[in-house]
Amino acid sequence: MSFSKRQFLQQVCWLAGSSHLFNAKHLLADDTDTTVQRDLVTAMQRAKLSLQFQGTSKSDFTKWQRTFRSKLTELLGDSSPPEEWSVTELGRIELEDHTRLDLLLSADGIPSLPIYLLKPKTDSSAPLPGVLCIHGHGPLGHDAVVGRREKLDASKYIEKSNYDYGLQFVRRGYLVAAPCMIPFGRRVDLERYGGQDPCAVTFVRMQALGQLPITANLRDLRWSISLLEREKNLKSNSIGCAGLSYGGRMAMLVSAVDQRIRVSAISGALNLMQERLSQRHSCGSQVIPRLLQYGDYSEIGGLIAPRPTVWETGSQDRLIVPDWDERFRERLRCMYRASGKPNNLHFDRFAGGHKWSGRVAASLFDDVLRT
């Protein structure tokens, strides 16, 4: 490699927040390469993240959070849930240890939201904590999270990823809200996309309307929290949030934005946007336009601090990229240290693939939400 190219790569790494070289084979194409892929990769690695946290003190962190939160709100647009809305019960299933309600939330001017509400059967009259459980990509949508296995291959899909964490939480005595996001589950007609990625197509279509899928889903998740708050037996100020894969990404975002969430578990989502968009395909449902001018997913994660959170990563998860994941962790450590609550940041590195763990999250949620 020529000296000029080495200098270029070192400069790129420095701008990305790392002092050591990362795997950048995709940047070493022939100098005559004029493809848009190379141009975008180069631009992605040069992103300056102008609002990346650089301080050390609690006052530094408080000021930074205020500034970055304001910028993130500007980039996302309005994600407020509706103030007035109605609930339609589509179905009710009485199971041995809980009741599963199939609900539709409706409000003027926005799409209706399908959501499951799980209620544990208990003899106690004590108030119950609540959990917002968010699904990721896949044909089952929110069905997987609540453990519905009626569809073909559903059991195999759920068992592979330990995907029924909503069912696991209700069996631990939690009220559980599990909404269906776009474009997944019953909120997408896959046959109408002709084999194209619904996430990419939905992103382009909504952009034409000045909207973002990620903001629409954020609004629906905040709406789901409001549904939990309507439950008379919900313990006050006791709502957590959990999600896997894209559900982990959205658990990160809604926890960062909505202070009603007291503790969160983010699984299989320890990826930076710089890494995702420069090394592989990433779905339109995760894209926040212009984010890399100011920060990355790590900075959004920093908005959760000082509230407790656990980041889960499987040792065999091929979606978690070495070096980039540690860069993410170190940025989070830096922000939690500055917040004054470094012990509220947890990492569950378990043996396994792209799946839900819960081994740290279960006890952490109990400690925070039941105490």
Image (cartoon, helix red, strand yellow):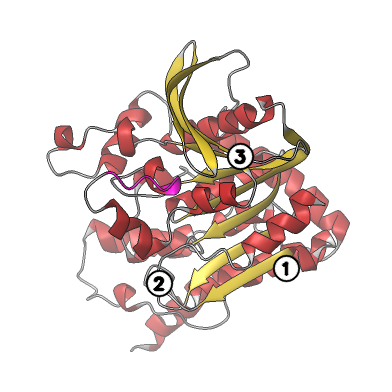
Q: Give the crowd class for mark 3: few <14, some 14-19, many >=20 residues within 10 Å.
A: some
| Number of callouts | 3
Q: Is residue 356 visible?
A: yes
Q: CA distance from mark 2 to mark 3?
A: 33 Å
x, y percentage for residue 325?
A: 52, 71
Q: Which residue is mark 1?
A: 334
Residue at the location (67% across, 56% down)? 302
Judge whether residue 147 is colored magenta: yes
Q: Looking at the picture, does residue 265 appear above or below residue 135?
A: below
> What residue did someone put label 3 on?
121
Q: Nearer the viewer, residue 207 or 224?
A: 224
Amino acid bearing label 1: Cys
217 on left or right of 140: right
What residue type is disc 3 on?
Lys
Question: What secondary structure characterizes most of the magenta part?
Answer: loop
Q: Earlier in the sequence, mark 1 or mark 3?
A: 3
Residue shown at 45% from the left, 45% from the top: 146
Per the image, the residue denoted by label 2 is 353
Whole-number angstrom distance, CA of label 1 to CA of label 3: 42 Å
How far across and how far down the image is residue 65, in percent? Answer: 74, 48
Q: Residues within 10 Å of mark 1 (few under 14, many from 20)?
A: some
Question: Would you say the residues marked 2 and 1 are in contact, meaning their CB atoms lie under 8 Å apart?
Answer: no
Q: Residue 270: image x %, image y %? A: 51, 64
Q: Which residues are magenta?
A: 145-150
Q: Mark 1 or 3, which is nearer the eye?
A: 3
